[in-house]
Image (cartoon, rainbow, N blue to C red):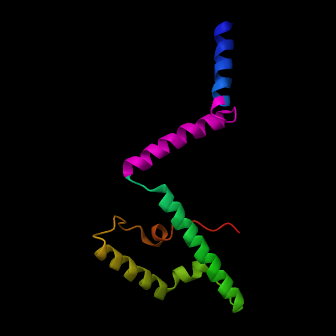
Amino acid sequence: YLVGLSTLICGYLWFLYHNREVSYRAALNLTISRRQTKLYNARGFDLARWEALIDEGNALRREIKQVASEYDVEWDERADEKDEKVTQALKRDRDAKDKAGGGGGEGKKGKAGKKGGGEEEDD
């Protein structure tokens, strides 16, 4: 009886100390975030830089949408990605960066890897 009660109290105090919600989901998210951080550090992934790039891409999208609305033009990013001229320009830019950066470590991710994995802005 006392072992079960003390385990319950210790668990509750642990959640209070870590300012987490007392639930299975909170404990799971805590362990996953620790593993994810370890993996990012092991692979040399800069999470702050990634988030800054996503924010920059979203700011550019907002700016393009604003300019398009000023000219009464409907801008569709997905339609532009399928355009042959845009595809060729992205390929030339990627090849130039690969040559200048010694490969860049990007491999053959294509447009999705270049644009941030298909992240869309939240409006």
Is residue 118 among the parts visible in the rendering?
no
x 46%, y 70%: residue: 114
* 62 to 44, vertically: above or below: below
Q: How many marks do you count on the picture?
A: 0
Q: Position of residue 79 (x, y in %)?
A: 58, 82
Q: Residue furthest top?
A: 1
* 30 to 116, vertically: above or below: above
x 31%, y 71%: residue: 101
Quadrant of the rendered image containing residue 78 = bottom right
Quadrant of the rendered image containing residue 96 = bottom left
Question: In which quadrant will I find the N terminus?
Answer: top right
* 4 to 32, vertically: above or below: above
Question: In the visual, does 7 lie left or right of 98?
Answer: right
x 68%, y 83%: residue: 66
Question: In which quadrant will I find the C terminus?
Answer: bottom right
Q: Main secondary structure of the magenta part?
A: helix
x 64%, y 23%: residue: 11
The part of the chain drawn in magenta is 17-43
**30 in the magenta segment:** yes
Residue in the foreground of this view, choosing between 60 and 121:
60
Question: In the visual, does 43 lie left or right of 84?
Answer: left
Quadrant of the rendered image containing residue 8 = top right
Q: Position of residue 116 (x, y in %)?
A: 51, 66
**60 in the magenta segment:** no
Question: In the visual, does 22 lie left or right of 57?
Answer: right
Q: Residue furthest front?
A: 17
Q: Position of residue 40 (x, y in %)?
A: 44, 50
Is residue 88 among the parts visible in the rendering?
yes
